[in-house]
Image (spheres, helix red, strand yellow):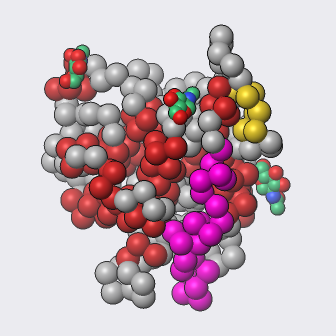
Amino acid sequence: MGSSFRTVMAIVLVMAAASIFGTVNGEKKCNEGWECKGSIYCCNMTISKFFDSDMFEILFPMRNSPVAQAVDFWDYQSFITASALFQPLGFGTTGGKSMQMKEVAAFLAHVGSQTSCGNAASLRGPYAWGLCYNHEMSPSQSYCDPNYIYPCAPGAQYYGRGALPVYWNYNYGIIGKGLKIDLLEHPEYLEQNATIAFQSAMWRWMNSVKKNQPSAHEVFVGHWKPTKTDNLSNRVPGFGTTMNILEADQACGPNGNMDTMNSIINFYLNYLDFMGIGQDQAGPYEDLTCAQQVPFNPSSSSS
Ligand SMILES: *[C@@H]1O[C@H](CO)[C@@H](O)[C@H](O)[C@H]1NC(C)=O
Ligand SMILES: *[C@@H]1O[C@H](CO)[C@@H](O)[C@H](O)[C@H]1NC(C)=O
Ligand SMILES: *[C@@H]1O[C@H](CO)[C@@H](O)[C@H](O)[C@H]1NC(C)=O
């Protein structure tokens, strides 16, 4: 079976790591148990209310099959525990039930496609195999870039690990800073602790990689206003632009791999069905694709 852990773009995440605990001014704040505390977003339904452990099983039914690499690693509780850091910031809690469910489906579609070991011939089809892996198989290098902000720890390897695989020391460094976990010293946490693996992926989804660029979350929920350059680059709010942010020219634009792009879109559409939302709720194809978009951050290497 083909690994979907791709050798990944060398995007430098240069933004100063934003605190993951923002404050919200003026508006009513709510608490909803341990899952969502102290924010206007917590006044909306929390994720566990519309996405329960049965639904997690429906999306990731084969993750513990004997041929999966990460048997017994990924579980629902780790997902919800991880989300508790980000629900107060709007992850899965923005814009009402339909948008909330679609955001979880979109986030998990990226996760599913990047950690899948399925293909068209696989038992139960290609979309049943998300969360098969938790780290890159047979890394070809240690992904250490001598970088003055986030220097490599002696002997550490920064190959792809996690739910949205993290590659390179500087990406481990910035995500670790955002989560206040020393991932530069301990990159292995991402393949040892599913909560940290999901938190790292959610941090990536919720944060922009460069000043003046949106996060995947913002473009998905409609909190992002495209600039003139974005308009000229065919970057529109919606799922397609989340691929631009997370996959860049691995999936998007004239150099993007159409199979990769279509696979991620198909994970999303199938997850919408699995979650009972229905893929007709995905919106027009122009918002789903990124084939005509100019990548925000073209990669310097690809496989
Ligand atoms: C909460 O949900 C409502 C719709 O039910 C939506 O109008 C509102 O914008 C949401 N709140 C936030 C902070 O997104
Ligand atoms: C996994 O990481 C979380 C978050 O840092 C931590 O609370 C938990 O104790 C860790 N689990 C294990 C088994 O180390
Ligand atoms: C970009 O396009 C949108 C949608 O057509 C439009 O509303 C917006 O004004 C445009 N932005 C700029 C800065 O031209």
| Residue 65 on the magenta segment | yes
- Residue occupying image coordinates x 25% and y 26%: 230
- Residue occupying image coordinates x 46% and y 42%: 99
Please state the total of marks drawn on the protein image.
0
- Residue occupying image coordinates x 47% and y 37%: 217
The vertical placement of 181 against 5, above or below, is above
Q: Residue furthest top?
A: 26
Dividing the image into 4 quarters, which one contains the C terminus?
bottom left
Mark yes or no: residue 197 visible.
Answer: no
Dividing the image into 4 quarters, which one contains the N terminus?
bottom left
The vertical placement of 243 against 237, above or below, is below
- Picture quadrant where residue 297 is located: top left
| Residue 141 on the magenta segment | no
Question: Measured from the top left, where is residue 215 in percent x and y?
Answer: 45, 33
219 to the left or right of 85: left
20 to the left or right of 226: right
The vertical placement of 27 against 58, above or below, is above
- Picture quadrant where residue 93 is located: top right
125 to the left or right of 253: right
Question: Measured from the top left, where is residue 190 in percent x and y?
Answer: 66, 57
- Picture quadrant where residue 75 is located: bottom right
- Residue occupying image coordinates x 41% and y 68%: 4
Q: Which residues are magenta?
A: 46-68
Question: Measured from the top left, where is residue 17 in percent x and y?
Answer: 61, 28
Question: In this orientation, which residue lies closer to the viewer: 158 or 45?
Answer: 45
Mark yes or no: residue 218 visible.
Answer: yes
The vertical placement of 123 against 223, above or below, is below
Image quadrant, ligand 1: top right
